[in-house]
Image: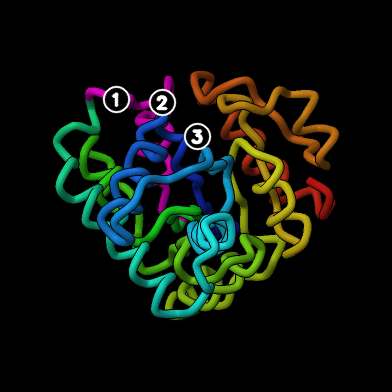
Amino acid sequence: MTGPELLVLWDIDNTLISARGFGKLMYREAFLQAFGRELSVPVDLGGRTELDVIAEILKQHDIEHTDEASQLLATALANSFETRRHDLPGHSEVLPGALEALRHFANDPRVHQGVLTANLRSVAKIKLEAFGLADLVDWDVSAFGDDHADRAELVRFARERAGHIRPFTPDEVVLIGDTPHDVYAATTAGVRLVAVATGRSSRQDLHEAGATAVVDDLSDLDELIRHVWKTAARGNRSA
């Protein structure tokens, strides 16, 4: 192998696949299953880790935020997704260019490709399996919303897990995501970022959050490749 190596970490919801409110539906079902009552306030996901969302839901419903209560809701959420996994394609879709981009980087021997997602590990796998994408990422170099409540800390988990390959410096890690939470994670952890304006955040929103490399979507593979390698080579931590 010659040339630089990269650890490329993908967000899932609204970066690789569209969500269309399916996650909120699963939370409603999970909360009812876990606590025997309906959610009384809307669930705000928006790139936040599941541990963060669960903590807020418990607080909003006057449920003590214990490890037991958090795990109860997380388990119910995973069960809801497992039960409804075959409904996912009817509520979601692979976003333009995502499959081609995943295939490209999976076939590049210089790239080690995983996910860095707010989802629980089990839910992340269900989502990508539903669209035939799961085999294109390395789950052993990935990080998930049940690893830590702070999304920036997930970068540390992914880098540590990738250590069995070799140590990856911050300059050799590239996040690809669609929200200011992804921008925050990258800038806080000192790694690279390519932001994608396929979620609720516009290009301007992402730039204002601190992203310098922003694409409209993943449909232009050449543009994405240029940004991934350019941000890795430039040595500008704000990217």
Q: Can residue 28 be seen in the rendering of this structure?
A: yes
Residue 77: image location, x then y, percent? 31, 55
Using the rendered view, name the quadrant where residue 150 is placed.
bottom right
Element under label 3? loop
Q: Is residue 121 magenta?
A: no
- In the figure, residue 87 lies in which quadrant? top left
Residue under label 1: 91
Q: Amino acid at mark 2?
A: Arg
Which quadrant is home to the C terminus? Answer: top right
Query: In this rendering, which labeled residue sits more in front, label 3 or label 2?
Result: 2
Picture layout, residue 214 above or below residue 128: above
Residue pointed to by mark 3: 15
Q: Nearer the viewer, mark 1 or mark 3?
A: 1
Identify the residue shown where x is 45% and y is 58%. 112
Residue indicated by mark 2: 20
Magenta stretch bounds? 90-111
Q: Does 33 sit left or right of 225 as displayed? A: left
Q: Element under label 1?
A: helix
